[in-house]
């Protein structure tokens, strides 16, 4: 948890996603689909701002959904992503047969 409000949590969530992807041999640019769960759709504008900050065109497909609660009552945002993993030698997406 980070101190502050929705924006601080969103920044941390996107930064955590970036680190997790990089640790797995992928990146934010390799995201195919992202689902962003928020506990208040009133934060939709800030979600769009964060998408523009962390993602580049062409933007990944996305779903932004309001949920009643997340894993902790203090949490206001959670991000789930599907991303390609790049072949370390060619930089091309790895095929299923190579994994």
Image: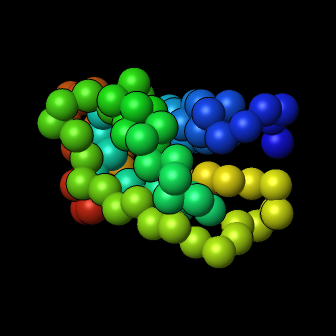
**Considering depth in this image, is 62 or 85 the residue closer to the camera?**
62
Q: Residue 8 at what x, y percent from top left?
A: 68, 31
Outermost residue toward the left in this view: 58
Q: Residue 3 at what x, y percent from top left?
A: 84, 32
Kindly identify the residue that appears in the image at 42 percent across and 41 percent down: 45
Q: Residue 76 at what x, y percent from top left?
A: 67, 53
Q: In which quarter of the image is residue 72?
A: bottom right
Kindly identify the residue that appears in the image at 30 percent across and 40 percent down: 30
Outermost residue toward the front in this view: 42
Outermost residue toward the bottom in this view: 68
Relative placement, left or right, of 55 versus 15 is left
**Considering depth in this image, is 55 or 7 the residue closer to the camera?**
7
Relative placement, left or right, of 99 versus 58 is right
Quarter of the image with the C terminus is bottom left
Above or below: residue 75 compared with residue 13: below
**Considering depth in this image, is 82 or 34 the residue closer to the camera?**
34
Above or below: residue 93 compared with residue 68: above
Q: Is residue 45 visible?
A: yes
Q: Is residue 99 visible?
A: no
Kindly identify the residue that appears in the image at 65 percent across and 75 percent down: 68
**Considering depth in this image, is 36 or 41 the residue closer to the camera?**
41
Quarter of the image with the N terminus is top right
Q: Residue 79 at what x, y percent from top left?
A: 53, 53
């Amino acid at each position: 948890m980070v101190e502050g409000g929705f924006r601080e949590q969103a920044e941390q969530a996107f930064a955590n996603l970036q680190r997790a992807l990089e640790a797995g041999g992928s990146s934010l640019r390799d995201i195919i689909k992202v689902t962003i769960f928020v506990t208040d759709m009133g934060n939709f504008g800030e979600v769009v701002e964060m998408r523009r900050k962390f993602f580049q065109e062409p933007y990944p497909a996305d779903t932004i959904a309001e949920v009643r609660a997340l894993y902790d009552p203090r949490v206001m945002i959670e991000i789930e992503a599907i991303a390609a993993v790049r072949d370390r030698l060619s930089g091309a997406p790895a095929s299923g047969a190579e994994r």
